[in-house]
Amino acid sequence: MTRLHVNVDHVATVRQARGVGYPDPVTAASLAELAGAHGITVHLREDRRHIQDRDVEILRKTVTTVLNLEMAFTDEIMGIARELGPDITTIVPEKRQEQTTERGLILDDTRSEVTAAKIASMNEAGIRVSLFINAEEDIIRAAADMGAQMVELHTGPYCHARGEEKRRELAVIEKGASLAHELGLAVAAGHGLSTVDVGPIAAIDVVEELNIGHSIVSRAVLVGMERAVRDMLEAMNPHGPTHDPEPR
């Protein structure tokens, strides 16, 4: 069964819009776990636009499944990660002006902030490293060469596509997932997925987990967090059990 990691960033977005203490992403994470989520994901951005340091500190103490910290590979955020010890870090590119992550990491010697040495430093602290990348052969091979343990394939182009283009984008992800698996990388996927289009991605044999946030939080506004998580689990695994949390 494909695992679901729920990203609660946008619970914090609502909170930060008014500068108050609610809604609390920590509470949202607990409700997601109760509903069957296999992990919690948060993105501690450099500009702290939604998730705050306090959130990650409390989540490290309260998450009972898996805590995935999305982050840029900067000295400040790396130091926080090493201190708190999430189960896994997902390295993502960041731009201050973007509404959300626009594309995967570019992994080459001239433009990438990701290095084998930085990955090794996380591993030495007992933290697995995943790289958020587009499903492109050269980038997948570079991720393996750098020593990452996992890649998260960017599903945004698939989610935004329609008709035949959507089928082509799905094929790109399937091919990329297969290559990553052959190279010894664990495979995750995410970005933009909803109950409408998550099924074909969850059905890819080698995709172990999905990171999904915005669509779950949006649905939770209308039906509640637990119902929104269960609906996503059902869309991912329509013929299997939906509650099988993986303990830390």
Image (spheres, grey):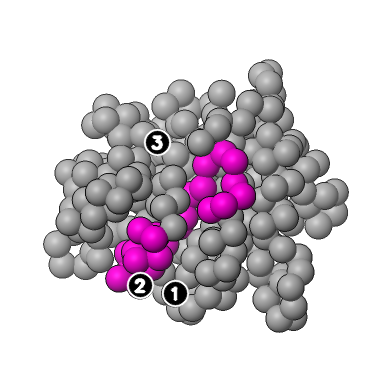
Helix, strand or loop at label 1? It is loop
**Residue 192 visible:** no
Splitting the image into 4 quarters, where does residue 242 fall?
Answer: top right
Q: Residue at x 35, y 72 (%)?
A: 76
> Callout 1, which amino acid?
Glu
Mark 3 / mark 2, whichever is N-terminal = 2
Q: Position of residue 173 (x, y in %)?
A: 42, 38
> Callout 3, which amino acid?
Val
Label ID, residue 76? 2
Helix, strand or loop at label 2? It is helix
Q: Is residue 74 magenta?
A: yes
Viewer-nearest residue: 37 or 125: 125
Q: Which residues are magenta?
A: 60-83
Q: Residue at x 48, y 27 (%)?
A: 204
Mark 2 / mark 1, whichever is N-terminal = 1
Q: Position of residue 89 (x, y in %)?
A: 40, 52
Splitting the image into 4 quarters, where does residue 9 fall?
Answer: bottom right
Label ID, residue 155? none
Label ID, residue 46? 1
> Callout 2, which amino acid?
Glu
Q: Nearer the viewer, mark 3 or mark 2?
A: 2
Q: Is residue 69 magenta?
A: yes
User: CB atoms at circles 1 and 3 under 8 Å apart?
Assistant: no
Q: Is residue 135 left or right of residue 225?
A: left
User: CB atoms at circles 2 and 1 under 8 Å apart?
Assistant: yes
Q: Name the residue tied to disc 3.
A: 187
Helix, strand or loop at label 3? It is strand
On the rendered image, what quadrant is the N terminus found in?
top right
Determine whether 211 is above or below 199 in the image. below
Few, some or many C-alpha atoms within 10 Å of disc 3 (few <14, some 14-19, many ≥20)?
many
